[in-house]
């Protein structure tokens, strides 16, 4: 009797890269650029940052994106992975954000809530959802 390999690496095709809508990909590329700028910035508390955004919404497009990138680690409890702008492949974190943005565009609140609840601790779900909804609204021009 001879053992057979079910996963032959010679003939295995690479896993398909997740796909998101074109508009979501444009937003992700913008977030990638913001992420590059924020790499050396101090991390922030999402709750306090969202409270400040509500008080002073000036230059909202940039500030919401920066707040998300600087506080994203807090929401997902690990260091997020963002590729360089223009890269066609998506990291897990980028694909997850893209799925959230796609759900927003479709008006699919159930999927949006499921994605948030499946990955984000309860105490920060509301703040992260607020930031993602705000970014989606700010980037409506794409």
Image (cartoon, rainbow, N blue to C red):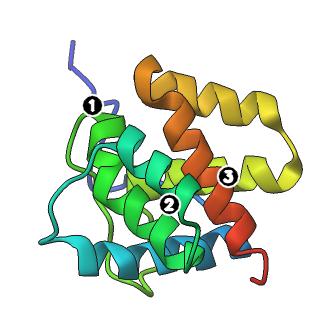
Give percent across and percent down for residue 53: 51, 58
> Residue at the top extreme?
1
Question: Which one is nearer the viewer's eye here, 21 or 78?
Answer: 78
Q: Residues within 10 Å of mark 1 (few under 14, many from 20)?
A: few
Q: Which residue is mark 2?
A: 17
Sequence-wise, the earlier of marks 3 and 2 is: 2
**Above/below status of 37 relative to 120:** below
**Above/below status of 77 relative to 59:** above
Tell me which residue sits at (75%, 47%) in the image.
103
Give percent across and percent down for residue 34: 37, 77
Label 1 secondary element: loop
Label 2 secondary element: loop
- Disc number lying in front (1 or 3): 3
How far separated are the C-alphas under marks 2 and 1? 24 Å
Label ID, residue 81: none
Query: Would residue 42 be visible to someone looking at this image?
Result: yes
User: Is 70 on the left or on the right of 85, as rendered?
Assistant: left
Give percent across and percent down for residue 106: 86, 51
Sequence-wise, the earlier of marks 2 and 1 is: 1
Tell me which residue sits at (75%, 83%) in the image.
142
Tell me which residue sits at (27%, 31%) in the image.
5
Label 3 secondary element: helix
User: Is 76 on the left or on the right of 88, as rendered?
Assistant: left
| Residue contact between numbered discs 2 and 1, judged by CB atoms under 8 Å | no
How far separated are the C-alphas under marks 1 and 3? 46 Å
**Above/below status of 20 relative to 26:** above
Q: Which residue is mark 1?
A: 5
Give percent across and percent down for residue 77: 25, 33
User: Is 88 on the left or on the right of 83, as rendered?
Assistant: right
Question: Which one is nearer the viewer's eye here, 129 or 117?
Answer: 129
């Amino acid at each position: 009797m001879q053992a057979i390999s079910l996963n032959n690496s010679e003939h295995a095709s690479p896993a398909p890269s997740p796909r998101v809508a074109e508009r979501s990909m444009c937003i992700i590329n913008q977030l990638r650029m913001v992420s590059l700028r924020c790499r050396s910035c101090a991390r922030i508390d999402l709750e306090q940052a969202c409270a400040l955004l509500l008080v002073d919404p000036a230059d909202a497009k940039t500030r919401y994106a920066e707040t998300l990138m600087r506080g994203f680690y807090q929401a997902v409890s690990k260091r997020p992975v963002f590729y360089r702008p223009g890269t066609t492949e998506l990291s897990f974190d980028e694909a997850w954000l893209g799925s959230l943005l796609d759900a927003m565009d479709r008006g699919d609140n159930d999927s949006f809530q499921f994605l948030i609840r499946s990955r984000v601790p309860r105490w920060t779900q509301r703040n992260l959802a607020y930031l993602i909804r705000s970014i989606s609204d700010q980037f409506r021009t794409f």
